[in-house]
Amino acid sequence: MGGGVLARLSIDTDLATKILCGFIRDQTRKAGLPRAVIALSGGIDSALSATLAARALGPENVLAIRMPWRDSSPGSLADADLLIEALGLPALTVEITSMVLPLFERFPEMDRRRRGNIMARQRMIISYDQSVAWGGLVMGTSNKTEFLLGYSTIHGDSGVALQPIADLYKAQVRQLAAALDLPPSILDKPPSADLWEGQTDEEELGFTYGEVDQVLYLLVDERYVVDEVVEEGFERAFVEEVWRRVKANHYKRTMPNIARLSNRALGHDFLYLRDWVG
């Protein structure tokens, strides 16, 4: 099952690198900010994003910010340090524990989800503060698999100015990261948001990236319907659950919808093309 789908997920890594570096240069140039700010967790997604940014803008123009919480894995910090040293990035460490604890203590009934959202949003606040201080765009680190499944926090890890790897499935992130020679300790460790001890993405999601990448690719890129994906050998309940998540989390992938009352509402109706041409 899925061997053919895995082959179709494979990318031309040289071409992908060229396109993504060009995208980063173009977006920063248009914003008038020749630098980037990136939250570096030590995971493969942020490591790949930082590597691409360093290639596109020069390592001296990419600020890596480590924002650990008291229960963050020391291994993740060590991997972030390893990449910072390997790329030659300027770096900053901002401990978030003292910033989020007062809110946790105000609402002691908070579950892990609420705490995780608060930590993600605190990191967004720090990133944007450093965006002003550093003079760089805040760069995202989310991949396509996470975005489609809604595995992100609005105004948290999704609160960024540009998303260089959000059109790469997790399998493609791994392929490109390997091609760019990221450290083995980063390539091989289980994906984790590192929000609490022992937390992993796949345990929270309830399935592996290897499984869901194939289903998402068929549903989204190949535009299969659920029945057609099932015919490829995937369990119907799994496919239906994945498709339900994709549809339910669409709101996370768009700007807030604006109710239209005028002839030119902000959003899709508000185009600058005539101003550019004329």
Image (cartoon, helix red, strand yellow):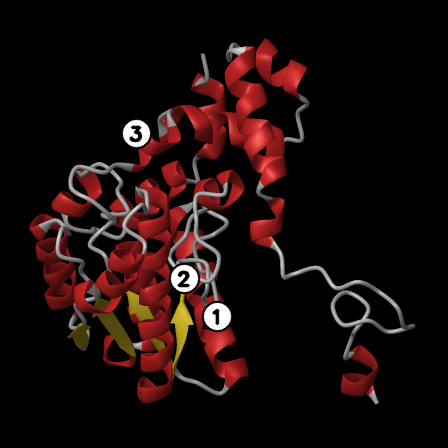
Residue wearing tag 3? 203
Q: Answer yes or no: do the residues labelled 1 and 2 have beta carbons within 8 Å?
A: yes
**39 relative position to 164: left or right:** left
Crowdedness near tag 2: few (<14), some (14–19) or many (≥20) residues, C-alpha within 10 Å:
many
Q: Quadrant of the N terminus?
A: top left
Q: Is residue 252 left or right of residue 94?
A: right
Q: CA distance from mark 1 to mark 2?
A: 7 Å
Q: Which label's residue is closer to the chain start, 1 or 2?
A: 2
67 lies above or below 180? below
Cα separation, mark 1 vs mark 3, equals: 29 Å
Q: Nearer the viewer, residue 101 or 113?
A: 101
Marks 1, 3: nearer the viewer = 3
Up the image or down, 238 lies above or below 78; here it is above
Q: In the image, residue 183 lies at what x, y percent?
A: 15, 50
Residue picked out by circle 2: 140
The picture places residue 145, in percent across and down from the top left corner, at: 46, 40
Residue 221, visible in the rendered structure: no
Q: What element does badge 3 sit on?
A: helix
Front residue of 257 and 48: 257
- Most extreme residue toward the right, as rendered? 263
Judge whether 239 appears above or below 14 on screen.
above
Q: Residue at x 43, y 35 (%)?
A: 10
Q: CA–CA distance between discs 2 and 3?
A: 23 Å
Instruction: Identify residue type, mark 1.
Output: Ala
Q: Which residue is tagged 1?
A: 161
Residue type for callout 2: Gly
Q: Residue at x 15, y 42 (%)?
A: 197
Q: Which picture quadrant has residue 50?
A: bottom left
Task: State yes or no: discs 1 and 3 in contact (Cβ < 8 Å).
Answer: no
